[in-house]
Image: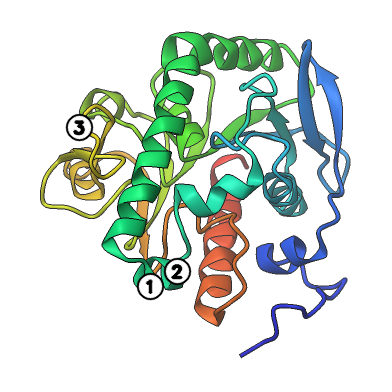
């Protein structure tokens, strides 16, 4: 097993290698009046532009900045706007939101119950504060301004967790978006998926407790909370399989928890491999559909 302290090679542009460097390449700029992390494409052009919508940890989570850099190295100009207006969750809350699989397996019933209570107390108010009626107009406005830039030929969207749902909403008709990648999209409903009409890549972990694999279509996104629900992976697949003419790919990664695409857990080779494969798939998806 590779050491978790191994430095990334300057020639290794994989997602896991870049996250190990802990040195973002991009920078924050004011874009359309919104604080935005910008990761330029290798050729400096904005022809193929991607908007990266984060989860509720927000743009200041270094992992997101490094992932934006990784996607940019794939040949895209990446904007990561702060749609949470500085209200992202602290990085240390990641272990509460979805503990690493090895840690989950060691937790007692009491520890799991306490963890779920903390999760509900935190995510409930956050979800209300940044609900669709508040967040979507900000995203719509950013996209509308971006579409006025004549140097941009096509726009794609990457979204993870909370941002994954907003990526799905932008995959509807007449949004000006050419392709979407939604990574563990959370808190979704059937009505979010039925209008999807642009090429979409979806990635889930089979050990995800927020968006689980379940024969029940609608599940509690936070175990024990009936008020916070989400369509399960199975429920999403049921809707998407009916869209026979839609270009889509749905990948379920084995032994991966919620947030595996950017959480940077180097304790196992499998985790690093899953992150790298997911990032490569996203880059390949946009190379195909933003061409």
Circle 1 residue:
106
- Residue 170 visible from this viewpoint: no
Describe residue 44's horizontal placement relative to residue 58 as left or right: right
Residue at 50% across / 36% down in the picture? 179
Q: Position of residue 144 (x, y in %)?
A: 62, 11
State yes or no: discs 1 and 2 in contact (Cβ < 8 Å).
yes
Q: Give the quadrant of residue 8.
A: bottom right
Near mark 1 (Cα within 10 A), the count class, few <14, some 14-19 or many ≥20, is: few
Circle 2 residue:
103
Residue sticking out furthest to the bottom: 1
Q: Position of residue 230 (x, y in %)?
A: 27, 35
State yes or no: discs 3 and 1 in contact (Cβ < 8 Å).
no
Q: Secondary structure at mark 2?
A: helix
Label located before the other in sequence (2 or 3): 2
Vertical placement of residue 94 versus 154, above or below: below
Closest to the observer, 62 or 249: 62
Q: Give the quadrant of residue 111.
A: bottom left
């Amino acid at each position: 097993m590779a050491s978790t302290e191994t430095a990334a090679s300057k020639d290794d542009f994989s997602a896991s290698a870049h996250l190990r460097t802990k040195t973002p390449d991009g920078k924050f700029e004011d874009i359309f009046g919104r604080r935005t992390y910008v990761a330029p494409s290798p050729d400096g052009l904005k022809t193929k532009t991607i908007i990266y919508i984060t989860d509720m940890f927000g743009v200041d989570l270094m992992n997101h900045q490094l992932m934006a850099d990784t996607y940019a190295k794939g040949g895209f100009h990446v904007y990561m706007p702060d749609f949470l207006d500085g209200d992202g969750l602290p990085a240390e809350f990641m272990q509460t939101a979805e503990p690493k699989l090895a840690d989950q397996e060691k937790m007692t019933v009491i520890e799991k119950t306490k963890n779920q209570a903390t999760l509900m107390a935190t995510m409930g108010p956050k979800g209300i504060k940044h609900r669709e009626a508040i967040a979507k107009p900000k995203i719509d406005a950013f996209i509308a301004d971006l579409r006025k830039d004549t140097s941009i030929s096509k726009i794609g969207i990457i979204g993870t967790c909370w941002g994954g749902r907003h990526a799905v909403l932008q995959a509807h008709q007449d949004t000006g978006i050419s392709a979407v990648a939604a990574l563990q999209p959370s808190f979704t409903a059937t009505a979010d998926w039925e209008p999807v009409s642009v090429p979409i890549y979806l990635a889930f972990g089979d050990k995800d407790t927020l968006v689980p694999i379940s024969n029940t279509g609608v599940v509690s996104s936070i175990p024990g909370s009936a008020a916070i629900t989400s369509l399960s992976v199975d429920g999403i697949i049921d809707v998407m399989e009916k869209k026979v003419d839609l270009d889509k790919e749905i990948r379920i990664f084995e032994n991966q928890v919620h947030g595996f695409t950017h959480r940077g857990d180097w304790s196992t080779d499998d985790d690093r491999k899953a992150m790298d494969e997911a990032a490569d798939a996203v880059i390949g998806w946009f190379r195909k559909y933003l061409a």
